[in-house]
Amino acid sequence: MEPVRRFRIMAVRLSIAITLAAGAIAFPFDRVVAHAILLCGLGGILGFWIMALRIEKLASVSGDKVHSLSFKWAFLRYVIYAAVLGRAFTLDRESIKGILAGVGGLLIIQAVVVFLGLTGLDRRVT
């Protein structure tokens, strides 16, 4: 389980750094966009953290319990995503820049996971 744990920690650290950097870069130009990126980026990271912890736990559970446990935690993840996207939408009701920035923030963790999967940076031990 050590490689899975190392991947999870590396993905979360890199995602937090990118989310904070994106929010800091956007802040001088548009506070709504910066707020949406930060809020949804952290929501996406929380959803990934929940999913990664559940994967580690489900690896040791019998086959008949896997479906019910995975559904419950997936539902919680989607509730988190809906809550942060809903809040991003309320930041700017006149235009859609809040929700678009929120979707971008949610996708940061996905991009980091793909990046780590392609490069294998999480497998390099220092």
Image (cartoon, grey):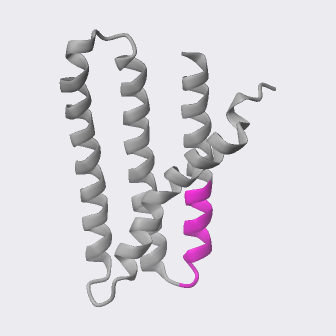
Q: How many circles with numbers are drawn on the protein? A: 0
Give how far across and how far down residue 111 sits, in percent.
56, 54
From what the image shows, is residue 95 above or below residue 10?
A: below
Q: Nearer the viewer, residue 44 or 74?
A: 74
Q: Residue at x 62, y 40 (%)?
A: 117
Give how far across and how far down residue 14 sits, in percent.
62, 47
Magenta stretch bounds? 18-29
- To which quarter of the image does residue 94 belong? bottom left
Q: Residue at x 43, y 37 (%)?
A: 49
Give how far across and how far down residue 63 sits, in percent.
27, 13
Q: Is residue 88 magenta?
A: no
Q: Quadrant of the C terminus?
A: top right
From what the image shows, is residue 108 above or below residue 119?
A: below
Q: Residue at x 26, y 20 (%)?
A: 66
Give how far across and how far down residue 102 sits, in percent.
40, 67
Q: Is residue 19 magenta?
A: yes
From what the image shows, is residue 97 above or below residue 50?
A: below
Q: Quadrant of the N terminus?
A: top right
